[in-house]
Amino acid sequence: MPWLRRWWALTAPSALPEPSDYPGAGQPRTARDWTVDAGAFVIALALGTLILRVTIDNTAYRMTSGHVAIDVACGTLSCVALWWRRRWPFGVALACVLLGAFTTLGTVAGLLALSSLAVHRHVRPALLAAALYVPAAVVCSIWLGRTNTWSVILPSAALAAAATAWGMFIRARRQLLSTLRDRAERAEADQLVRAESARLAERTRIAREMHDVLAHRVSLIALHAGALEVARDLPPAQVRESAALLRETAHEALEELRNVIGVLRAEPGHEHESMAPQPTLADIPRLVEETRRAGAKVDLEMQVDDAASAPGPLGRDAYRIVQEALTNVGKHARGTHARVRVAGAPNRGLHVSVRNPTALGAHTRPAVPGSRAGLLGLQERVTLANGVLVHGPDASGDFVVEAELPW
């Protein structure tokens, strides 16, 4: 019979998912569990003995020596069975209920078994065992020879309901505590993940900023130094001018490096105030002029309506795009003619384009080493601004960096 097999399966030691604060199947019993189980055994045996003595002295019952022997034997078995109430809660509860039909010594043990069943199992097997507790009490009353057997129905039903309700309360409380603990652990784990993501994003931002502000300056220094190395017959005035440019460029690179280091050293909750102003659209001509002074050939075309009203982040992104593209020209295509075009207007967007032919022939001087992270940084910057960036050779063979930024 399938229903009988299902109910019999509940007596197996395969416990349901248990809260982590009490053992289930296969988990070792802790010192606290041993103490609780020993206390339950002693309480059940002591109170059961007291109930048995009261029953023997009660004239309403006709207990013989045989009744007492059977009562003690069944009650002792019920008390001993409590040691396995955690591993086989349904089986122990059924055994205590069935033995309760022939013992008063096992009355408290049966109630403890019902409570433990309600703690370790769902409500249906607990209600079944509680329902069987009442007819077992009636059978016990008949077996003891009591004349008014129906008077035990209400007290036994109340005791069974109280024991089951108490077990269900403990189970619900433990499940609630387990849920709250799991929720707190998940929240803590999520907080750690968010903090790690924030740290990673901040490191990426700082790395991108260091690349943007330093790579161009170092590239200019390399171009100035290379020009001095090649043109050895320059007049003293031009040599002094080139040296002054080197000194000025190195000074600017140090200032920008100091600002980035200031961001790294800032205390949590205290933002570092940069001493250098952030670049804007109006600074692009100055950037192109600095590149020209380093010996590069750059043409600039700016067709921007109302450039003064451009948002700060938009101007900074456009400046960094031109800066990175010109830095790459100095690294990988020295001697070529670059063309920079910036055009746009409010509500129409901003278009930034830097185009240069690929380098012809081999260079006599080694190129400035690159990290290959500049264009990736630009891609992240433009993506964060909800723009579009494309880069690479076009059909004519020129290397092109183009960006469309919302405005």
Image (cartoon, rainbow, N blue to C red):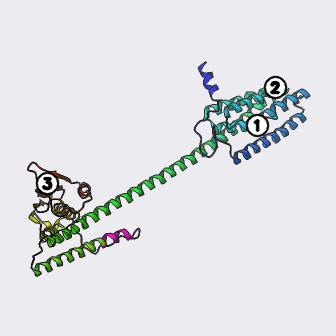
Q: Quadrant of the C terminus?
A: bottom left
Q: Residues within 10 Å of mark 2 (few under 14, many from 20)?
A: some
Helix, strand or loop at mark 3 = strand
Callout 2 amino acid: Ile
How far apart in space, not on screen, are marks 1 and 2 (Cα)?
Answer: 20 Å
274 vs 148, nearest the viewer? 274
Residue 330 point in image, percent of width and height: 16, 63
According to the picture, the residue beneath numbered tag 1 turns out to be 109
Cα distance, mark 1 to mark 3?
A: 87 Å
Q: Which residue is mark 2?
A: 142
Q: Indicate the secondary structure of the residue bearing disc 2.
A: helix
Instruction: Check disc 3 and give the amino acid type.
Output: Phe
Say which residue label 3 marks: 399
Give the label, 2 or 3, closer to the camera.
Answer: 3
Res 79 label: none
Q: What x and y, as percent, mark residue 62? A: 89, 28
Is 311 inside the magenta-drawn segment?
Answer: no
Query: What range is drawn magenta here?
Result: 258-272
Q: Is residue 344 visible?
A: yes
Observer-nearest residue: 101 or 76?
Answer: 76
